[in-house]
Each structure stands twice: as structure tokens, then as C-alpha cells.
Image: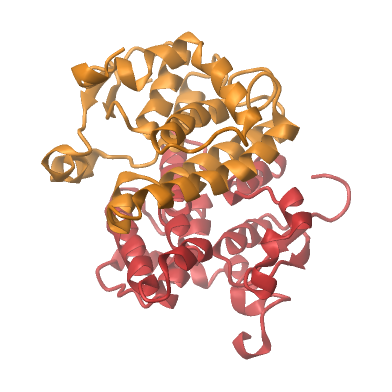
Chain colours: A red, B orange
Amino acid sequence: MQAGKPILYSYFRSSCSWRVRIALALKGIDYETVPINLIKDGGQQFSKDFQALNPMKQLAIIEYLEEMRPTPRLLPQDPKKRASVRMISDLIAGGIQPLQNLSVLKQVGEEMQLTWAQNAITCGFNALEQILQSTAGIYCVGDEVTMADLCLVPQVANAERFKVDLTPYPTISSINKRLLVLEAFQVSHPCRQPDTPTELRA
Amino acid sequence: MQAGKPILYSYFRSSCSWRVRIALALKGIDYETVPINLIKDGGQQFSKDFQALNPMKQLAIIEYLEEMRPTPRLLPQDPKKRASVRMISDLIAGGIQPLQNLSVLKQVGEEMQLTWAQNAITCGFNALEQILQSTAGIYCVGDEVTMADLCLVPQVANAERFKVDLTPYPTISSINKRLLVLEAFQVSHPCRQPDTPTELRA
């Protein structure tokens, strides 16, 4: 890592921020949070100052952390397992989340938002549930926590927020439950961030 | 690589397939194409047979190829440059393409399709043009062809298909032009694939 504490520009409820927070917690990297409110002022992420800084994509941050601080590893040693981890991560971070994020839902319009988000998530989860049946152990890929798990938990939280019925996804649900009890997933949880509003704290 | 020729399930016009074809060409990996027509029969990708096979996300394939066949390298040796390459790749493959792919445009409805696709691409290209100003050399990141370039060229082709005005993106445009003359980008081009319809061949 660079000298000085790394800064995470974060929004408590953002699933993308949460992914990175889990990675930082797992790797024991101390960091400073600078909250970016994605709603207030029409979205602080659109400010000129932030646009100049914003590296935009979070899997790239996680891959970078992995290279700079390789233990504990978030990518398995075996290349095929590593490909599975990246496939699952990309499926969530590239195939589900972008379709149900704030700016897309704004475009879709208020009336259609919920259906649109539910549709994006169920399409993705149908594929994911099937994939996990051949890759999962205790967690998404085998028995170690990987980048795929960092993507899974925040996406399940989004699914719950959009009232997606999770009963067709027993594998997703049980992996999610096993992950949520781990400390790194708890300290990074949206309900425990510096910018979490009091009424949402737990 | 595994024994036997690898099989690429490919659609001539898919920007995701094209990315992988460029990687295979650059690395000199001989492969067999099995065409999957994304339009015919309501989309052959939805068939049961294909769903069981489909690894879904193409950046994971490229990362896997990179590990199995490291030369020529598609990720720079320097970790910061590597992070830039992944950031740009994710921005395109996770932030632009998923918002303007076939299945999303179908949901958006015929009337709004063009505006929607143009909007997704210009939002992404605004960010990308700015990022490239600090990362680009001859190509997206420095002077070597990387995974970011494999993502750029097919996305610019999509932009042209959706009639996006590229004049605000001089960096994107000139990198695209420099890449299109390279052999790997030509042999993998949508107009030269086994499943390219005769009227679109060049």
C-alpha cells in the first residue's frame, strides 16, 4: 500500500462500496471513510471534485488490493477456481448490479422501478443459483471466502431491499447466511457505517 | 490450455464475443467457433443446452487466458497500470455494455431503445474519455495492447451502430483507429466471422 491511510469514498448503502469495505476488513487494512451521498444534492458523485477522483469500478480496486496485500487471499490459487470466482463476481458486478443501480432506476421511471430491479435480479440469480451448484462449498467457490462472496452478500441485500422472493435460491440464501456472521461482513455492513443515518443503525 | 482445441461459443456481432476473439488472436490460440445466434429462435443463448455451458462473463475468460497463456501479456506488469486496465475494462464491460445489450433493450421497448443505448454509451464514454487522458499512450494504458483495448474497440463499434456522435471523444476515437489496423482486431472483426451473414461480410 501507499504511505498514509487509504481513503475510501463510500456510501453506506451502496453495494459497490460494501464490497470494497469487506475486502479491506478481511485484509485488515485500516482506512479512512469519506462519505459520498449518492442521493443528496442530486448525487454528490456527480460533483466535479469527485468525478476527477472516482476510479469508478470496484472489482478493479479489489484486484489491486489482492495484489498489494495478498493475504488472506481473495482469489484461489487454482486457475480454474480463480476463473469461477471472477465469473461469479462479474456476473453480479457486471450483470446484475449495473442494471438496478440508482442512475438506471431513475431513467426507468418511478412506476416501473421495482419490477425492473426485480427482473434484473431474478434473471441474474437464476444463472447464479445454477452456477453455484457446481462451484460452491461452504462459500461461493469452495470453502474459502473469495471475491465472489464479497459480491454476493451486498447483492442479496439489494434483492431484499427490492423485495425479491429468495425461496427459489436456496444455495444463494444459505451461502449468504454463512457469510453474514463473519466479522468482516458485519463491520462493513451498511447499518454500521459513519454515514449511516441514525434511524437505520443497528 | 486443455487438451484439444478450445471452443468459443460466439455471435459475430456480440461485442463480448469479439473481446474474447481478439484475446485469442493476440495470444495465437487456435480455436473452434460454435455460433450462437442471439436473435434466431428467440435467442439460442436461452436454450437449456447452452445455459448449462455458458460461463456468462467474458472478462473472466480473458483473465483465465492470461494466466494460462501469459505471452503476449494483456495485463501490464506494474500493479497500478494493471489496476487502470481493469478499471477501464470494468467500466466498459460492467458499466456500459450491460446497459445496452439485447436483453435490456428488449425490456426498454422499441420506441426508447435508441435513446437509451445512446445515453448509456455517452455516460460511459464521458467518464472513459477523461480517464484515458491520464492513462493512454498509443493505446488505452501506455503503449502496449491490453485487456482495456479488447473492450474498447467492440464498444466503439456498438456506439457507431447506435449512431453516437463520437466527436466529443477524440482520445477514444484515435485509440480505436490505431487498434483497428492491428491484425488481431481485423481477424476477429464481426464482418469476418463464420456466422457473419453474407450481406455484412467485408
Residue B9, percent across and down?
A: 26, 29
* Residue A122, picture quadrant: bottom left
Q: Residue furthest left?
A: B41
Q: Residue at x 18, y 42 (%)?
A: B43
Residues B58 and B193: in front is B193
**Is A179 positioned to the left or the right of A28 in the image?**
left
Question: Residue A104's spot in the image, x, y percent?
Answer: 47, 61
* On-image quarter of the N terminus of chain A: top right
When the figure is inspected, residue A105 is found, relative to residue B141, above or below; the finding is below
In this rendered view, identify the residue nearer to me: B25 or B4: B25
Rendering coords of residue A20 (x, y %)? 63, 57
Q: Left or right: where does residue A63 sit relative to residue A121?
A: right
- Residue B100 seen in the figure: yes
Q: Residue furthest right?
A: A4
In the rendered image, residue A94, in percent from the top left (x then y), is placed at 46, 49
Q: Residue at x 56, y 69 (%)?
A: A182
Image vertical order of residue B165 relative to residue B98, above or below: above
**Figure quadrant of the C terminus of chain A:** bottom right
Left or right: residue A112 compared with residue A100: left
Check the image and report above or below for A28 versus A177: above
Which residue is drawn at the image coordinates 48% and 49% (left, top)?
B120
| Image label count | 0
In this rendering, is residue A11 above or below A2?
below
Q: Is residue A91 visible?
A: no
Residue depicted at 34% across the width and 42% down the height: B56
Q: Quadrant of residue A185?
A: bottom right
